[in-house]
Amino acid sequence: MQNTLIKAVDNGDHASVFYQDVLRSMAAARIPFMVGGAYAFSQFTGITRPTKDLDLFILRKDFERLTEALKPHGYATELTYPHWLGKIHCGEHFVDLIFNSGNGIAEVDDAWFEHAVEGEVLGQPVLICPVEETIWSKAFIMERERFDGADIAHLIRTGSGAMDWQRLLERFNPHWRLLFSHLVLFGFVYPDHHNLVPRWLMDTLIDRLRGEMETAPAADHVCQGTLLSRAQYLPDIERWGYRDARLLPPGTMTAEDAESWTEAIQERGHKSD
């Protein structure tokens, strides 16, 4: 596992030493965290790929305590986007501290930790983000420059037998249509593996779709496309009068959160989610 995962990072020895020190320091400070991103994807699928950073998933309430714990090690942290992302810096290298998704939907809560799996990253024993939450958070990433549908297909292909499909469904509510779309796409990608998705789940989603089609459309003039892409549905809310589904209520983001996240669209090299 260790040698395979090291190949997923191609930033040189300095980055690896930095990442290892952060992992050890957070463990010593007893700050709960999980590893996600390329490392988690490699553990679940066996697919390795270069990555420019290390993704650590934490509870939002632990960010300030983490900041204090890392000060003696000379590491600076920043709350890059208060609604979902912080960073630990060491020269040109950084670690992402993720406590939500960019759209404010996939908040890290205690259930992430309850269902995390044990693993090893860069020689350090760690918790790996659960496959169900990994799929949940990736399902919303549909930017022009990034679409994580292939990741979801690979996660289902390799991990369907161990997945808690009921819990996955509960995570998506009320965004069950999005889960349905990825499961339909999975059957297209792997025609000989469509049975890896439980029949009861597809029946449940088909029944929901049928029931929705038999009712009148909602009166709320909302565009949920902003939950999928922070850029591509801006005309809908800026020119055509649609309400932004990210905003309170029933979304989780403030207008300030959405504005700062939109302003960052032009930042090259920044994560879409």
Image (cartoon, helix red, strand yellow):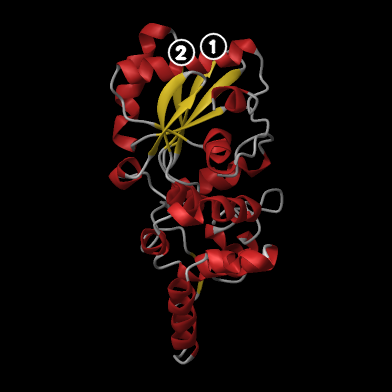
Mark 1: amino acid: Val
| Structural crowding at the residue carrying mark 1, measured as other residues with C-alpha within 10 Å and reported as few (<14), some (14–19) or many (≥20) | few
Q: Position of residue 35 (x, y in %)?
A: 46, 32
* Amino acid type, callout 2: Asp
| Location of the C terminus (image quadrant) | top right
Q: Bin the neighbour count of mark 2 within 10 Å (Cα to Cα): few under 14, some 14-19, many 20 and up.
A: some
Q: Secondary structure at mark 1?
A: helix
Residue shown at 57% from the left, 58% from the top: 228
Tell me if label 1 and label 2 are in contact, CB under 8 Å.
Answer: yes
Q: Which residue is mark 1?
A: 17
Residue 103 at x, y percent in the picture: 49, 52
Q: Quadrant of the N terminus?
A: top right
Q: Is residue 46 left or right of residue 26?
A: right
Report whether residue 263 is seen: yes
Label 2 belongs to which residue?
Answer: 21
In this rendering, is residue 114 above or below 205? above
Residue visible at 50% across and 88% down in the picture: 213
Up-down relation of residue 183 to residue 61 (above or below) = below
* Residue 243 appears in the picture as rendered: no
The Cα–Cα distance between marks 1 and 2, rounded to whole angstroms, is 6 Å
Q: Which image quarter: residue 82?
A: top left
The residue at 42%/45% (across/down) is 130
SS at circle 2: helix
